[in-house]
Amino acid sequence: MSKKWVYLFKEGNANMKELLGGKGAGLAEMTNIGLPVPGGFTVTTEACTEYYNQDQKLSDEIIGQINDNLAILEKECEKVFGNVDNPLLVSVRSGAKFSMPGMMDTILNLGLNDETVAGIAKSTNNERFAFDSYRRFIQMFGDVVQEISKDKFDDVLDSAKEKNGYKDDTELTADDLKEIVVAYKKIVKEETGKDFPLDPKEQLLMAIEAVFRSWNNNRAISYRNMNDIPHDIGTAVNVQSMVYGNMGDDCGTGVAFTRNPATGQKKLFGEFLINAQGEDVVAGIRTPKDIDELKDIMPDVYKQFHDTAALLENHYKDMQDIEFTIEKSKLFMLQTRTGKRTAAAALRAAVEMVEEGLITKEEAILRLDPLSLDQLLHPTFEAEALKAAELLATGLPASPGAATGKIYFTAEAVCEAVANGEETLLVRKETSPEDIEGMYAANGILTARGGMTSHAAVVARGMGKCCVAGCEMIKVDEAAKKFVVGNQTFTEGDFISLNGSTGNVYKGSIKTVTPELSGHFGQIMKWSDEMRKLKVRTNADTPNDASVAVQFGAEGIGLCRTEHMFFDEHRLPSVRRMILAESSKELREKALAEILPMQKEDFIGIYKAMEGRPVTVRLLDPPLHEFLPKETKDIEALAADMGIAFEDMVTVIHGLEEFNPMLGHRGCRLAITYPEIAEMQTRAIMEAAIEVKEQDGFDVIPEIMIPLIGINEELTYLDKVVRNIAELVKKEKNSDIKYLVGTMMEIPRATLIADQIAETAEFFSFGTNDLTQMTYGFSRDDAGKFITDYKDKGILPNDPFQSIDVEGVGKLVEMGVMLGRKTKPDLKIGVCGEHGGDPKSITFFHNAGLSYVSCSPFRVPIARLAAAQAALNEAKK
Amino acid sequence: MSKKWVYLFKEGNANMKELLGGKGAGLAEMTNIGLPVPGGFTVTTEACTEYYNQDQKLSDEIIGQINDNLAILEKECEKVFGNVDNPLLVSVRSGAKFSMPGMMDTILNLGLNDETVAGIAKSTNNERFAFDSYRRFIQMFGDVVQEISKDKFDDVLDSAKEKNGYKDDTELTADDLKEIVVAYKKIVKEETGKDFPLDPKEQLLMAIEAVFRSWNNNRAISYRNMNDIPHDIGTAVNVQSMVYGNMGDDCGTGVAFTRNPATGQKKLFGEFLINAQGEDVVAGIRTPKDIDELKDIMPDVYKQFHDTAALLENHYKDMQDIEFTIEKSKLFMLQTRTGKRTAAAALRAAVEMVEEGLITKEEAILRLDPLSLDQLLHPTFEAEALKAAELLATGLPASPGAATGKIYFTAEAVCEAVANGEETLLVRKETSPEDIEGMYAANGILTARGGMTSHAAVVARGMGKCCVAGCEMIKVDEAAKKFVVGNQTFTEGDFISLNGSTGNVYKGSIKTVTPELSGHFGQIMKWSDEMRKLKVRTNADTPNDASVAVQFGAEGIGLCRTEHMFFDEHRLPSVRRMILAESSKELREKALAEILPMQKEDFIGIYKAMEGRPVTVRLLDPPLHEFLPKETKDIEALAADMGIAFEDMVTVIHGLEEFNPMLGHRGCRLAITYPEIAEMQTRAIMEAAIEVKEQDGFDVIPEIMIPLIGINEELTYLDKVVRNIAELVKKEKNSDIKYLVGTMMEIPRATLIADQIAETAEFFSFGTNDLTQMTYGFSRDDAGKFITDYKDKGILPNDPFQSIDVEGVGKLVEMGVMLGRKTKPDLKIGVCGEHGGDPKSITFFHNAGLSYVSCSPFRVPIARLAAAQAALNEAKK
């Protein structure tokens, strides 16, 4: 029983992408629906795998099947491979399951040799065409199959032109080309030690093997690495009889989309060249014409192509990207595939296709890439203005959008400039929590150090603020208020511009354009909301963030961090007095009393912005030393301010330092040591809620969230502390307001004893950032040292901080959900780590049965769409 | 249906400890086997719980049953409660399931009042005795039940003696005592506002309630906290008719053990007083006589007691601690319970009882406390020498044993002094890995800072070296080579002595005694080995540790850390050169080549010491910055030594610093970045094994252990690295030696994907220290800041680093075992964290199906016994 390694086009179909590759499946499908496709066959991806299994050799069985199918092709085309009078010529192209541009160049005109070239000359009555094709074939074959440097061939061509005083290739005569063919064959002999293969069958097998080899060239491997394509699926090879768009003015070639890939408009979009081969369009030697013009030049062919395109879109129910050739007024289809498009085009096409009845709403939702929506939510540079801009450097695209402004090197300077009405950018070596105010005030952030998960990157994404991080080409000198890049120096107040979507840094100011969320966007969101089961909340710490998120459709706040409020420069002195109170509960309570009204105002603003939607407030989380100064001069200032000796202040600060702050005195551990802090925060949360309810009529139900629970008794202890104060406030204010007390699930142990924790907790929220850190035993701050190595060595193909690690961390999430619901079947369970805005992770959270995801405001639309897809995909199963 | 709240002694038995308390069950059992026990009854522990449930009130039902049983008691004793002519008097004593010394004082002579005292005077024909009993009763009742300060009563007594010029209580006449009774009753009236209760039934109920209340007094609560006794089990109350040892010279009272509780020798051991009550023996006013002397004074009573004691031991099949009273030549048994004993006595008694046929080997094994064996393994101070010693300070008993020597303040100074033949102690503020050599050379270690899990404590326990840690009373000035305690200053070379079992620090040298492991010890170990299923290995990094462990019965090394070898002062320069090679693989390999022969020598020594037993070697684990100097002067020296600019050296060192080293670049992550290190170590391990096999004939099978695996690809990558070198070495040496490659299970994620990991790993070893840290999200180094608060607030009753957290960390261990064995049913799985030497944890590991535990050498005997007990307990189920 032999396996089928080769399929004629008519034997395949669109669903066989895995076996035939994308191109092969497309050719097969078009053949079967009766479109004019030049005959041919596909050697399968399995043959590629077999080739590697057999130590890079084609088995006799595969060779046999190739020859059998070649014979059928000869019969179909009524031409014969290698026949002098009526030779069959073929193209050989690679085609994997996933599109991998540039993996291997195409070989055209395979089958030409010293004899068949004459047959072509005779049958086309064009000797020059025949020899031009022949010399092109030798060059392509030499380059692609035999790995001979292209330059060597070009040198021969150039010197022939020089000798004859030609400017263009087109001036070469048939005789010139014959000489060139001879010279080319000499190169091959010199380089390979063998004659150029004249046997067409030998040429074909060599070409097929070359395609298989190209699967593992460096370009292909790194492309697969970058695009998460498996390395073991192999490529197919398509062998197709040649048609020619370059045999005269009744010939041509072109590429077209069934809809505009930039806007989504339903109208053929594309271009073509008369008397040219496909590669000429790509090479850009001549300027192609708009596809509309074909209507005037070849009305019949245009109509046929127009109808065929419509038929293909209708058949595939999606925008198609089509390649065609016209040979002597006859249309041939060479490729069709789903057309790549911008996010805006994708939305419009999806909505309009539903309106046209072409696809269902569900299909429309499923075909959109949630992440691409991000393009539509952020400012971009005006295209014209950008053209004139000078690129200074490129860093990491840490948080998308475009921003322009005057540079400042400290948060204070930014805030001051913004107060004076300036547009600003914050430039730092790296940011720290003390910079929050400045980050918030600036239009964008540029850092010289730090990766995609550095403080600057994480905070900026949270704020939806443009950020270029880790831009190591710039040397920042904060003290001197300048940065140097190349031989240019930029000082405070100079304008630069940042593109956080690409990581580009430009000199000067570039005009930005604020995006408008079109009606198609709204329609897609509306459909998504109808389909999804997961609620979508946002992580927001300010009224402004909250408002933005509500506009993006957030249904509540899943994480309101309270520590950012502590970093406000007007509050920091009180916060520091609270911390430095140390063993004096009295002093600490006094300092907390100063903070209370400020925290309360924060919550009032947020509740109002959320207009009655639920708000989950997390109690203070970071270790206290984060609020204390690190630099000697700042410590001196603080000591003077507090009337403490400098040495004593240093001692206190050192005493608070930790070996592993991530695993130290923070989260609920702080609240257990200093219940006064939790009490103050609870009071602020409750008083604000009661006030907003009474004054604005919003029915606020605050959800008080206790972080870092790992031991059941931590929660039972703090639950009492919180409830005591909450009830006290209710009594004081004579209010019957409702509130919930719940916990983060971010310590591995919490997920293991979630059944116990659910006895007290009224909700869970998975903090997957910390859960990932502890489950992996990685600190994000330190992992940079080895993570690059891990990626290079294929040890960590995906970043578990970006997309949830389903098999490890995910198992703990599932356990937490299962155990929590065992105790409380209706337990509300959310996620508020960065994974809450990641589509892949959202699929997992949906399947795990979570109630909601919470993400940064700019991720909310993405999450809504991804949640809908998750629900649809589940229903499909 | 009413519940039974009260049991007559004859209604109970020895198995009813939970309901009747230990004392009540003992009295019941003795009553039922026909021993002379004064009649009485027990109010159950359930009644105590009910008392608390009913808001601290005795229900009518309970009161009713007390009265019913009182009536039966009256009938039995032929006396009547409150009857003037023939009054029944009773004692009231608490008695919980677990012995809780000092929880509540006993009340004697309850039932006395102004009328019954006359009856007693008449029936005993001793008015003085009657009134002395009465005034004692009022004082006891006032103190214990009515919470009146004892001093008030003592003042009256003292002034009466003073007034009459008496020196002793015994000089008080009946009339004096009558006056005192009047004065005592006045005190009661003044303090409580009520008359002293004269109704015996009221007295009884008040006394019973007082016992119940005493269950929740501060002393009792903290005793339970310290001893892991649940708070909700309540206490019983024993009401028993009085007998008197103080009615004349034919009376007496005493306490005796059926065997010697210090040595275990089979011979009555105890003491008695003639004409005294039980409390007189305790009070120590008169010197009691040896129990042997009773033979001469009351031969019949002695014989009866001797036989009764033998009968009780026989009955309970264990050494008994017995209280008795002789009333007018009649013996009464008042208590029997299992006698507390030293570890040595426990061993001897257990072995001899098996030889006597009293108990089985299994019973002998089960009744020993594994942890108590520790007493027998370490040096102790000579008792006489200790008496003369001056106690300077007390720290934490971090690692047991006694040590004496001259103090030195740096590891170098210790090493030098030891090289000169001195006995030394290392005194430091706190130790760091750089001190390892000095810790090893010194007789003991004293630190001023750090807890039971500090570096000094952990390493010292690992070495079996005496250590007192966190001794904050001493102020260490390392630079000045001195420490100050109180107003005394000790400088380099002064003698002090340490008791690591108590935390005591003494002035001067005290002679120590090295323990001998007696035949009983060996016998118990032999029986343990027959019964246990878990293998017991040791954690050992040196040939000396390995030898000690083998003497203690270790069956292999479960964890040989290689980093300690890197700290050797002769190697550190090479290690540092390796680290500072940074991006130069060549320089690093050169430095590694210098280390290779030294590592190889280490392994040769260890293999020889283990004589063919398996040795698991863990590849380098700690982050590299641990090997670099921290002090400026050390950095300067290193920079000079390496010919690097100081600033550059500082930059490199800073570059290696981490925010959270625990979660940083260490373990297998190091080996992935620098495979050369793993390759050098593998070569050393293999070459040493082959050499020892060939030269000494030991069939060494090295087990190479890769630490900190969390991702399957980490292991597959390093497995290849290790195997490549191992195979290369085998080929070079022409050897067919066997070896295994396995991994630590210490990252939570590893336990979750253990099925994948087991595909490559040939063994697992749970590193429960790190696993606990990451599962809890605690860093041991930092947890000190909040852990005290956690204990105070009852949030963390047990230290999860001491005894494994079964419900959290344990769940991950079980998952790792289950998944690992799913892939490889016979997978060898051990544990090498500190939990490997903890009996409670060993029970868990046995039940979880582990193959072995590995612990520090001095824990090996403990683990052998604990493993046997775990196996026996499992078999019982």
Image (tube, coloured by chain):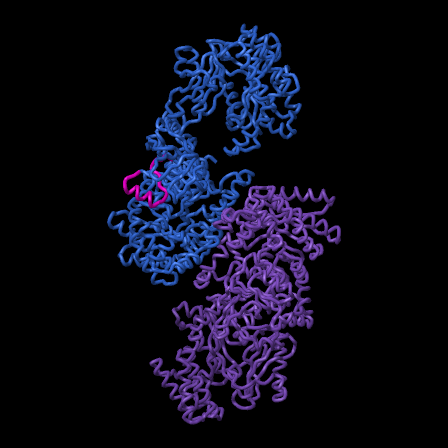
Chain colours: A blue, B purple
In the depicted structure, whether residue B645 falls above or below residue A243: below
- Camera-side residue: A664 or A451? A451
- In the figure, is residue A113 to the left or right of A449? right
Q: Is residue B636 above or below residue A380?
A: below
Who's the residue at 63% across and 81% down the image?
A: B307
Q: Residue at x 52, y 61 (%)?
A: B430
Q: Does the image show residue A620?
A: no
Q: Quadrant of residue A316?
A: top left
Describe residue B588's horizontal placement relative to residue B631 as left or right: right
**In magenta segment, residue A405:** yes
Q: Nearer the viewer, residue B676 or B104?
A: B676
How many numbered marks, from 0 up?
Answer: 0
| Residue B473 on image: x %, y % | 48, 68
In which quadrant will I find the N terminus of chain B?
bottom left
Q: Give the vertical position of A329 relative to A570 (above or below).
A: above
| Residue drawn at the location 39% of the way across and 72% of the way down | B57
Task: Work out whether residue A733 or residue A517 is closer to the camera in this orientation and state it.
Answer: A517
For the magenta stretch, what is the residue range?
A401-422
Residue A691 in sight from this viewpoint = yes
Q: Nearer the viewer, residue A374 or B268?
A: A374
Q: Position of residue A257 (x, y in %)?
A: 42, 21
Q: Is residue A273 left or right of residue B368?
A: left
In the image, residue A692 sits, relative to residue B383, either above or below, namely above
**In magenta segment, residue A330:** no
On-image quarter of the C terminus of chain B:
bottom right
- Please tell me in which quadrant of the rendered image residue A289 appears: top left
Q: What x and y, as percent, mark residue B839?
A: 58, 62
Q: Position of residue A564 (x, y in %)?
A: 36, 48
